[in-house]
Amino acid sequence: MVAKEKVTVTVIKADVGSVVGHSRPHPSMLQVSKDILAEKQKKGVIEDFYVTRVGDDINLFMTHYKGEGNKDVHGAAWDCFQAATKIAKTMKLYAAGQDILTDAFSGNVKGAGPGSAEMTFEERGSEPLLFFMADKTEPSAYSGPLSRVFLDPFTTTGLVIDARAKKGFDVEIHDVLDCKKVVMSSPEETLDILSLLGDTSRYAIKRISSRAGIGPAAVLSTDKLNLTAGKYIGKDDPVCVCRCQSGLPSVGEYTQPFINTTWLAAGWMRGSHYGAFYPCSPEDSDPTYYDGPPRICCLGFQINDGRLQGLEPLNSKGGDHEPVDFFKGATFDGARARSIKASRFMRSQGPFCPSILPAEEMEYTSRPEVLKSLVARFENISDAGKPKKTTKKKDVE
Ligand code: 13P
Ligand code: 13P
Ligand code: MG
Ligand code: MG
């Protein structure tokens, strides 16, 4: 390794089948992924790795010096998902191969189904990282918590008292429906940023970078959002990787919003309901209540010369890593109880908005067939004749 070479942290995730509906991958699917990545580490494709899951999604954390979008690194993840899919099919697990949209790997997982979040940076003297992983939801579910962390000084005191954090952050926002992106800067444009992000059906954060020269602060997987313009297909159970401390939000500033607020997130049950984010350990991430509620986990590692360092001994191999599990403990019991309370309230509304998502965001709906069957029975109720055809209001006229 050349001194000051930039390290890349890559997380690639996919749901390729699970035991009992959309609950969890079979242990052998995680094991085969570990075996494949251990082999790739030996061959020098990656420096280090950790394999975990949230609900039914396999998450592969990888570190390397090959930069973002690298064919070999993405290929390593692709090999894992192929092998895990094979196991899922052999076992007749549910939705085997769910997120694999193509037979042929073309050098990058983008557009092929799996989600990816990558960031490249010069490793600092100490480099704490948090890996958030969510199931049964979409990237814009992170917009509220990240807005609190990066835009709200009443949440993150670091924005007031840390001279470098005070310089603010560049926020890359994606317009999901028009396939466009814009970079806006906090604190000057905070209110305008919130004006966009408040529309969770259209806008999501892709990346946040320091304006004090520290580099990337947070990056999300938004791959599915970018697949199709004009149609919303974003329930891809996204990850969010965050660098912490020394000019960036501290570890605790990142975790705080998950206690202070009970966040509603879209994508629960059949990808078509709002539920409340349930912060928990990966061990507790089986979606046991109405296929949810949307789970969020937070695992922490330090980076040490391109390798992951958790609670395991120095220089342990990828398979032996042990991250700090931030949402596991009793500190989050109250937040979990509030999540269930809020989710039960949402469920009490049955199949009505806003318990279910607006029509254009439903993962699937039988309404077109219902309407088709009623064509002959629908009658005009106005003498003025056929009402004018309405179209969805554009965001900018
Ligand atoms: P310590 O003094 O424990 O290093 O904590 C500093 C800090 O910023 C915690 O958020
Ligand atoms: P996943 O996206 O996690 O596979 O969940 C699908 C679903 O709709 C479960 O109700
Ligand atoms: Mg699934
Ligand atoms: Mg899932």
Image (cartoon, rainbow, N blue to C red):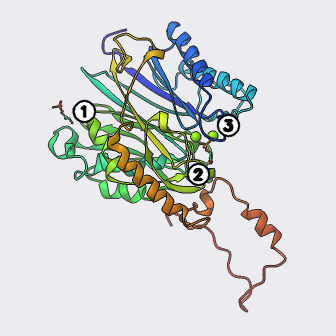
Amino acid type, callout 2? Tyr
Disc 3 beta carbon < 8 A from ligand 3? yes
Question: Which numbered circle lies on residue 98?
Answer: 3
- What separation in Å lies between label 1 and label 2 (alpha carbons)? 37 Å
- Secondary structure, mark 3, is loop
The residue drawn where x is 60% and y is 57% is: 361
Q: How many marks?
A: 3
Residue tagged 2: 290
Q: Which of label 2 and label 3 is nearer to you? A: 2
Q: Residues within 10 Å of mark 1 (few under 14, many from 20)?
A: some
Q: Residue furthest bottom?
A: 383
Residue tagged 1: 245
Q: Which of label 1 and label 2 is nearer to you? A: 2
The residue drawn where x is 57% and y is 46% is: 235
Res. 351 image quadrant: bottom right
Amino acid type, callout 3? Gln
Q: Is residue 215 left or right of residue 97?
A: left
Image marks 2 and 3: residues in contact by CB distance under 8 Å: no
Q: Is residue 271 left or right of residue 309?
A: right
Disc 1 beta carbon < 8 A from ligand 1? yes
Question: Which numbered circle lies on residue 91?
Answer: none
Q: Position of residue 80 (x, y in %)?
A: 61, 22
Between 55 and 266, which is closer to the camera in this rendering? 55
Q: Position of residue 76 (x, y in %)?
A: 57, 19
Res. 385 image quadrant: bottom right
Is tag 2's residue or tag 3's residue first in the polypeptide sequence? 3
Q: Is residue 332 left or right of residue 177?
A: left
Q: Position of residue 103 (x, y in %)?
A: 73, 28
Is tag 1's residue or tag 2's residue first in the polypeptide sequence? 1
Q: Residues within 10 Å of mark 3 (few under 14, many from 20)?
A: some
Is tag 1's residue or tag 3's residue first in the polypeptide sequence? 3
Disc 2 beta carbon < 8 A from ligand 2? no
